Amino acid sequence: MRIKINMINGIIATVILSFIAKILALWLPFLGAEAIAMLLGIILGNTVLTGDTWAPGIKWAEKFPIEIGIALMGLTVTLRTIEKLGINGLVFILIQMTLTIVIVLWLGGRLFKVSKQSAMLMGAGNAVCGSSAIASVSPAIGATDDQRRTAVATVSLTGVVLLLVLPVIGPYLVGNNNLLLGALVGGVVQSVGQVVGTAALINPTVVTYATLFKMLRIILLTVVVLIFAKMAQKNNIDSSVAKPSKGIKIPWFIIVFVILLCVNSVISLPHILNNSAKSISSFTGVVNLAGIGLNLKIATIKKSGGKFLAYGLVTGAIQVILSVILIHILFN
């Protein structure tokens, strides 16, 4: 989307907030820049940055930079990631993601009574990679901005809770084995930044294993998008998005993600390219959450916050339980 003059103020404000969050994360590594950006955004978006001067640019910054970040994630992972984790690691992630999605959809429809779009966004965000997965699935199922923002806020806040809890209870649940702790953290925690932050509170070796498990979840993002797009078509959730006769509309950034992943898997690219893609992807994730926070109004939180917070916390608890059971079955 082309940047217009009336967007400049909001874009600059969102980017500055993102840089501030990155700096604060150096002193608050247990939170991570993503969570800090969202929390600061919620505060500023409901107090200082409330006028029409900021809205167009903030909305742009919330939606479009993350698409570039998702596309560039393809340069940060390879198909060899699967080989490093072994067959048990692959099976663990596949079962964990599948059960998470099935249970989250069931909870959303039967217990918490949320819309089908919201349940799908919660399923994708928890099963794959937080806000990036939600941003990828959202256009494929015709979700509204409020549904997307609420899901991102819920998943991100759940991630913060897991970030604080898992380093404490993890060793009691799966022992002091670094691989198993990496599986627990990498298989449960939502965003990449929160995975690294959680694992870092345990030890550097767990960071390596947790990141590998997390990357495998990201590799499967395209599959999740296709599944939810097909479900949207089958249920005719949004006729403007889901029309069976026209097939599944895959977002451009998912296509680029797959292409770059394949290229990165068969060609040895310069490390500076991989590292730059990783840095840019990470920062666009922070910008995305800063924009979401700035756009997420207190009225929206009050309208569905309590229900969604409970939805998120129950989902997080179930993910941990599933992960522990699967780890004991597959790795012991």
Image: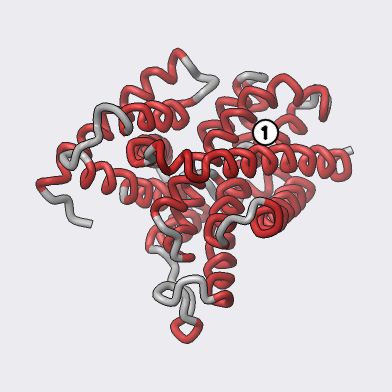
Which residue lies at the image location 54% right of the left edge and 20% below the top edge?
A: 30
Which quadrant: the C terminus? top right
Which residue lies at the image location 43% right of the left edge and 43% below the top edge?
A: 300
Which residue lies at the image location 34% right of the left edge and 50% below the top edge?
A: 63
Q: Position of residue 154 (x, y in %)?
A: 54, 40
Q: Is residue 138 left or right of residue 87?
A: left
- Residue corresponding to mark 1: 185
Q: Position of residue 56 (x, y in %)?
A: 21, 47
Secondary structure beneath label 1: helix
| Number of marks in picture | 1
Q: Nearer the viewer, residue 272 or 89?
A: 89
Q: Amino acid at mark 1?
A: Val
Report whether residue 268 is seen.
no
Q: How is the image coloured?
A: secondary structure
Which quadrant: the N terminus? bottom left
Which residue lies at the image location 82% right of the left edge and 44% below the top edge?
A: 326
Q: Residue furthest left?
A: 5
Q: Is residue 203 above or below residue 258?
A: above
Q: Nearer the viewer, residue 161 or 284?
A: 161
Quarter of the image for residue 212 reads top right
Q: Nearer the viewer, residue 52 or 8?
A: 52
Q: Is residue 5 left or right of residue 76?
A: left
Q: Position of residue 295 (x, y in %)?
A: 34, 41
Q: Is residue 1 left or right of residue 247?
A: left
